[in-house]
């Protein structure tokens, strides 16, 4: 049996949608449909009920899913053993698929990958940018081995989340912005700050969402004008140009702060956002994945 059919079937089962599964697997939807139909024909079972809003596992489909995941797990172990056995001197080799949000992809993970290449040159890291919801779905379908989530609380039945570090946050503006001119002696209060312009990371960024909900829109008389970008660089550039304020990870603006292009808004302080290391509870931790897991904490503040 072609395990690609099982992998596609598992992706459709976990996402409940052919289009979403195709995106996760980097396939066109017609290929996903054809592979599911091929598996159904080979097994002689209808695995899904097709509904207007997606697909739902049939009873036999649920039983097949459990066995398919076991086969895919066994395949993963077999490939890891074969890769390690073929490595020179028994060194760790293999591919690890890791995801994180743009905050960590730009600030932390280049250093992680560079260090891992020096210590384990046989380990290849496939890095993908995903938010929490997409990463959890991809862990469930087996598209990812590990994910870094910026979430203070992360509880999922089948996903194990381990707090890795705290990522410091800072509210920044241009040194010439009016809220910076008062300095620490007369900082602007939240009633005033809630009337400013903000350039924040896209919806789904946990710390930006909480900032808007708990502070900006909760303040009495709040009338903030909020623009959200899919790119941290776009938000940072708008703030550097003096157009407004932004809440960002300190690591993403450390150079700009040091050079005086940005400054911390006086009188503001935010708790660190937790970096969670997430993996599927039932999946085997390959030697390559274990090597990356051991390297990650060395590149975060303690």
Image (cartoon, rainbow, N blue to C red):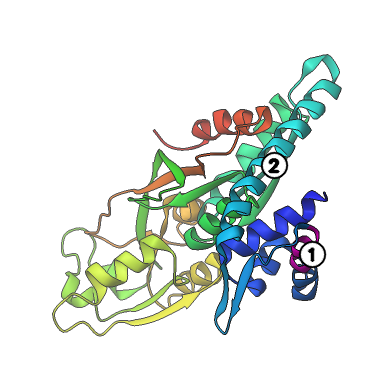
Vertically, is 279 above or below 90?
below
Helix, strand or loop for disc 2: helix
Residue 245, horizontal then vertical, whole percent:
37, 71
Residue 60 is left or right of residue 92, and the answer is: left
C-alpha separation, residue under disc 2 versus residue under disc 1: 19 Å
Quadrant assignment, res 224 = bottom left
Which quadrant does the C terminus fall into?
top left
Vertically, is 56 above or below 248?
below
Q: Are marks 2 and 1 in contact (CB under 8 Å)?
A: no
Residue 193, horizontal then vertical, whole percent:
24, 74
In the rendered image, the residue lying farthest to the top is 89
| Residue under numbered circle 1 | 41
The residue shown at (80%, 59%) is 42
Observer able to see residue 197: yes
Give, as a single range, the part of the protein colored magenta: 35-42
Instruction: Provide the major secondary structure of the magenta segment.
Output: helix
Which dot marks residue 54? Answer: none
Quadrant assignment, res 260 = bottom left
The residue shown at (18%, 71%) is 190
| Residue under numbered circle 2 | 71
The crowd level at tag 1 (other Cα within 10 Å; few <14, some 14-19, many 20+) is few
The residue shown at (76%, 31%) is 78
Helix, strand or loop for disc 1: helix
Observer able to see residue 259: no
- Say which of marks 2 and 1 sits in front: 1
């Amino acid at each position: 049996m072609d395990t690609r059919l099982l992998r596609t079937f598992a992706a459709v089962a976990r996402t409940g949608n052919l289009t979403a599964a195709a995106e996760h697997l980097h396939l066109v939807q017609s290929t996903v449909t054809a592979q599911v139909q091929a598996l159904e024909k080979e097994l002689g079972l209808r695995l899904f009920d097709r509904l207007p809003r997606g697909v739902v596992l049939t009873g036999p489909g649920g039983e097949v899913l459990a066995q398919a995941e076991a086969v895919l797990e066994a395949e993963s172990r077999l490939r890891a053993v074969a890769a390690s056995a073929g490595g020179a001197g028994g060194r760790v080799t293999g591919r690890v698929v890791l995801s994180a949000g743009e905050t960590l992809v730009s600030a932390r993970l280049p250093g992680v990958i560079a260090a891992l290449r020096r210590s384990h040159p046989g380990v290849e890291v496939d890095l993908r940018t995903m938010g929490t919801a997409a990463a959890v779905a991809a862990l469930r379908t087996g598209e990812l081995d590990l994910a870094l989530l910026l979430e203070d609380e992360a509880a999922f039945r089948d996903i194990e989340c381990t707090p890795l570090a705290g990522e410091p946050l800072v509210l920044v503006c241009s040194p010439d912005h009016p809220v910076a001119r008062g300095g620490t002696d007369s900082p602007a209060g939240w009633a005033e700050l809630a009337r400013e312009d903000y350039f924040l990371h896209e919806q789904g960024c946990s710390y930006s969402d909480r900032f808007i909900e708990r502070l900006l829109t909760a303040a009495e008389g709040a009338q903030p004008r909020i623009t959200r970008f899919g790119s941290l660089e776009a938000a940072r550039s708008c703030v550097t140009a003096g157009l407004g304020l932004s809440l960002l990870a300190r690591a993403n603006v450390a150079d700009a702060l040091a050079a005086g292009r940005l400054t911390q808004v006086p009188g503001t302080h935010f708790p660190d956002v937790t970096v969670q290391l997430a993996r599927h509870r039932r999946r085997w931790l390959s030697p390559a994945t274990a090597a990356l897991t051991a390297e990650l904490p060395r590149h975060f503040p303690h």
